[in-house]
Amino acid sequence: MATDATVNPPQHFIRQIVAADRQAGRHGGRVVTRFPPEPNGYLHLGHAKSICLNFGIAAENGGTCHLRFDDTNPAREDPEFVRSIQDDVRWLGFSWGALRHASDYFEVFYRGAEKLVRMGLAYVDDLDAEQMREYRGTLTEPGRNSPFRDRSIEENLDLFRRMRAGEFADGTRTLRARIDMAAGNINLRDPAIYRIRKVRHQNTGDAWCIYPMYDYAHCVSDAVEGITHSLCTLEFEDHRPLYDWFLRQLDLPSDPSLTEPLRANGLWLQPSTPQQIEFARGNISYTVMSKRKLLALVNEKLVSGWEDPRMPTISGLRRRGYTPEAIRLFWERIGISKQNSVIDLGVLEGCVREDLERAAARRFAVLDPILLTISNLPAGHTETLHFPNHPKDARFGTRDVPFGPRLWIDRDDFMEVPAKGFHRLVPGGEVRLRGVGIARCDEVLKDADGRVSEVRCTLDPDSRPGMAGADRKVKGTIHWVSTEHARAAEIRLYDRLFDVPDPDEESGGKTYRDYLNPDSLRVVRGWVEPDAASLPPEARIQFERLGYFVADRHDHSPQRPVFNRITTLRDTWSTRG
């Protein structure tokens, strides 16, 4: 179902820039974007914002969005992450144009670096990393020239080629751009272009022992792929002058010596001079989205893995039961701006409820059971009742639900000493059994510990559907599952992973680990109606009166039903003190 946000998407400054560029004929009227993740972890909700923006802007303008893996740091990358990223993009509902890796362009990067050396705009430096930081200066003090900055072009070419040949040890030499060590923008103070890393690469093997730095490889990759609008988050705003400097010096569209490897290897697209545009990140309360912290949660076994349904990873949200439609709707509603802010997680949960209210079929389940026995029905009595699968959409059809004299009901639906305002089952009181009729509690039985184990009731036959008293009013209606037909199920009650809005705030010696919510997962053995047990993995349903649930994508089967709670029916966090 289309929403107002998808039919009439709200305007924001990036949409306005792209519209103005197309109207002016800039980039030949083309719109080509890209999503360029580093494959060093699973994608999270913040990445989903970038995915929705980049793919969405391209689609809205009849353009293309490429998927490119920034695999220039082989020590931190893993093919598992490459597979998961592709799965996440597809699951969110997007298709890419070209699928590329930065390593596809290693020869182009190298030729571009040699061109900078020949132009006198790059040099080989022997300072180590600590010395380079010392020479770089501070925000208030200019940097100092490296003692190796004035090497001749010939010497720099020779050293750079020997770096590529593997003659030098890791960290002993670096290729740097020669720009301005007194620049107010520290990113322009002779940034590194290449470093020596003798690490085997998952795509190129041992062909290279030098690897380009992100600021260099990223802009060249954008130009190589014909990107028109390079959309990135605000932390790259100060890097934009460097991005533009590299593109201006290399001038890829007019230099066939740089782009020849693309044609030779079937990688030719349409080199461009892209423009970088920055937008605010998507920070969300009650979670952390630093890859470093997420990796620590996984490695320290504080969660079950990257796909743990409490994690803010796209894979985790999928396993939790969130829908791609809800995630897309969330980011569309939040919009795009230049102002960093923290978004309440409740907004996302609201989008999930809104989507599932219309899209999720209904079923019955009991999570904390007590036995309800209808004493005026024969012990062997069985009948089949018919229930709509959705109360507001007849297209969902109906289902058969078996009914008998022994039922499971939720413990919360009975109170021996009722509190004020309690309108469900009490001793001597009446309640409507959903789709069955009105039952009166006649007797309460307890176990050896004094806990209520069974309530015995009388069913009013005149209140059955179709009978004269079916419309008789009682204040409470409860759901149930027939004990004879119920299927045992593992129910995983997930909640927020952290119990404070800002777990990133470190004070008093505490870190995000200290704010883990001890109630973020509770596993119970419940009972579900037979039809629920037979649902396929990833089927999303509403267990009536309990919340939205999903059949676990990995563990669920008809023989062993496993359901994850997606979210409660209402926001319970906004009312907590």
Image (tube, helix red, strand yellow):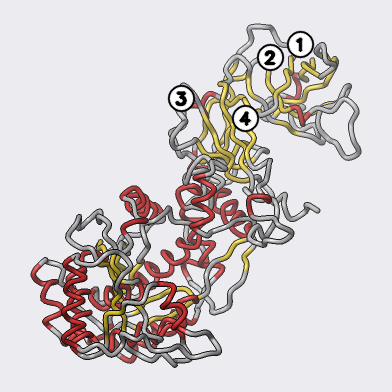
Tag 3: residue type? Pro
Tag 2: residue type? Pro
For label 2, count other residues whose C-alpha is less than 10 Å away and answer few (under 14), some (14-19) or many (20+): many
Q: Position of residue 385 (x, y in %)?
A: 59, 24
Residue at 67 percent of width and 26 percent of height: 480
Label located before the other in sequence (2 or 4):
4
The answer to whether mark 4 and mark 1 are in CB contact below 8 A is no
Label located before the other in sequence (2 or 3):
2
Q: Label 2: which residue?
A: 405
Q: Height in image: 83 above or below 488? A: below
Q: Label 4: which residue?
A: 365
Q: Nearer the viewer, residue 2 or 310?
A: 310
Q: Height in image: 481 above or below 271? A: above
Element at label 1: loop
Q: Nearer the viewer, mark 4 or mark 1?
A: 4
Q: Nearer the viewer, residue 461 or 412?
A: 412
Which circle marks residue 558 in the picture? 3
Residue at 36 percent of width and 51 percent of height: 81
Indicate the quadrant where residue 231 lies.
bottom left
Indicate the quadrant where residue 354 lies.
bottom right
Q: CA distance from mark 3 to mark 1?
A: 32 Å
Q: Label 1: which residue?
A: 375
Label located before the other in sequence (2 or 1):
1
Q: CA distance from mark 2 to mark 1?
A: 7 Å
Residue 85 falls left or right of residue 503: left
Residue 469 falls left or right of residue 295: right
